[in-house]
Image (cartoon, rainbow, N blue to C red):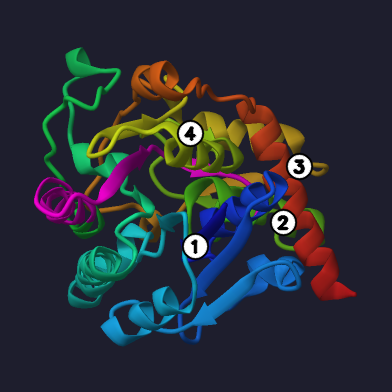
Amino acid sequence: MRVLITGSEGFAGSHLAEHCLAQGDEVWGTCGSGARATNIAHLLDQITVRVGDLSKPDFIYGVLNETRFDVIYHLAAVSFVPDAERGPARAYEINVLAGIHLLEAIRTQHKHAKVVLASSAEVYGHVKPEDMPIKETQTVAPVNIFASGKAALELAAHPFVTTYGLNVTIARPFNHTGPRQRPDFVCSTFAQQVAQVEAGGEKVIRVGDLSPKRDFSDVRDIVRGYRLLAEKGECGVPYNLASGRSVSVKEILEILIQMSRVKVEVVSDPARVRKTQVMDVFGSYDRIHQRCGWTPENPLEKTLRDLLNWHRDVIMFKKS
């Protein structure tokens, strides 16, 4: 298959590119103007990359004019909640308008293509304990800018399915982590701080609120789910990608500290506490399991060890 991955330079995008290559796909990707391509540097001789702004229609029309794609994965987004909250207009421009431009370009030029839209489990918002694990039938009620943008794109995509006949499947991944994740995200910031302490830095890990619980998956399981949805996902249907259980941020920190080669001190940092916070969330992956046979494969401890080792390698590379 010839596939296009928007946001191919990103955390999940780079892993999806690797996975698709391993499955024998011909991979194309888009990369944001001015974005760093570090995550795909090792793939540049294997994939075709086009650089531009997805919120500008001419860019995506130009890419789709170049060749025929069998599958289009739309991953490009402002994915860090605080980034979206600092610039709501730009977040909506990228997370909503760019997606609509892409769908319109697909409608006019690539109507045959299968589209996998990467949404987010953030669209569910605050969910009562008795309604967990969250199923796809749960009411969508986003509580932050990032989540509302994802929910809006899901809603905008439906007429492209019902009116224009596009083959669109929606993926709703819960939290995922692993190598290459930005250190802004909780698992990655803890792992980076542990690696910095090991490298001779201050023996302190600064943390925010450790009480929230999240459904953490390995990014490599998530992208494997994306490709299965491209093959078998039902048109117009959302699918959760989840581990099926929640783990506290405190437990994540404790696992990484246990993996540390040196002793560390944990210090509370009020600047790291989010104003808007969902305290506990975990999802059901029954629907994608029944439809595609997907199930999470990587244990959390392996994911965190791989993440920590990646940060160790990055620090060693910078020092060399």
Q: Nearer the viewer, mark 4 or mark 2?
A: 4
Q: What residue is shown at x 38% (from left), y 54% (from top)?
A: 113
Label for residue 263?
3
Q: Residue furthest top?
A: 130
Disc 4, disc 2: CB below 8 Å?
no
Decide: few, some or many residues near mark 2? Use Cα within 10 Å; few <14, some 14-19, many ≥20: many
Q: Which residues are magenta?
A: 150-179
* Between discs 2 and 3, the one toward the N terminus: 3
Left or right side of 283 for 40: right
List the residue tagged with mark 2.
311
Q: Which mark is residue 216?
A: 4
Of the numbered discs 1 and 2, the one sitting upstream in the chain is 1
Q: Residue 44's quadrant in the figure?
A: bottom right
Q: Nearer the viewer, mark 2 or mark 3?
A: 2
The residue identified by callout 1 is: 4
**How far is disc 2 from disc 3 in space, using C-alphas?**
17 Å
Of mark 1 and mark 4, the one earlier in the sequence is 1
User: Which is closer to the viewer, label 3 or label 4?
Assistant: 4
Q: Residues within 10 Å of mark 1 (few under 14, many from 20)?
A: many
- The structure residue drawn at horizontal position 65% and vertical position 38%, both measured from the top left corner, is 304
